[in-house]
Amino acid sequence: MSPAAPQLQPFASSFEAPSVQQMSAAGLRAFGRIAEAWALTVDEQIKLLGEPARSTFFAWRKTPEVAKLSRDTLERLSNLLGIYKSLQILLPDASAADRWVRQPNTAPMFGGRSALDRMLAGNVVDLHAVRRYLDAVRGGGWS
């Protein structure tokens, strides 16, 4: 008779998903660094974040740890972080990566305008389109 198979115990994870407040704080801190690297104006930052009230924006900037961002704003931050990361991978020279967002781009989706112009159109889909474009370039799937 063969020995009995060992009993597998359910995996007990102590992992807890981060709270909205934790994601908000981390995202806002990262966005602040990106905004500085890309030399974004306050108005550009507000537009990229979905046009919160100026007082709200400055409160987020002053104390990100107490912010509880909407799903829309968190999605915007996710796309912006993805764009930033892709640029760092594609253009390892940090200054070139940071300049790329403002340079005219001949890819059809940009029509000679910059990626930042596309991102500032105001819709989450515009941020997502830039992120998808960079992800495709990284994967060799964009011509």
Image: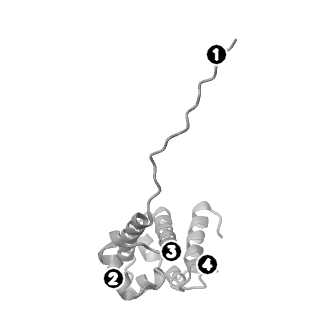
Disc 3 or 4, which lies upstream in sequence?
3
Tell me the quadrant of the picture where the C terminus can be found.
bottom right
How far apart marks 2 and 1 lie (CA) works out to 66 Å
Element type at mark 1 = loop
Disc 4 or 1, which lies upstream in sequence?
1
Q: Nearer the viewer, mark 3 or mark 1?
A: 1
At which x and y percent is residue 35?
A: 38, 76
Element type at mark 2 = helix
Q: How is the image coloured?
A: one colour
Q: Tell me the residue that label 1 is attached to.
A: 3
Q: Is residue 120 above or below residue 94?
A: below
Q: Is residue 76 above or below residue 8?
A: below
- Identify the mark at residue 58; answer none if there is no mark: 2
- Identify the mark at residue 107; answer none if there is no mark: 4
Q: Amino acid at mark 4?
A: Ala
Q: Amino acid at mark 1?
A: Pro
Q: Tell me the residue that label 3 is attached to.
A: 76
Q: Would residue 102 be seen by someone viewing this image from the given angle?
A: no
Horizontal side of 122 relative to 52 (left or right) equals: right
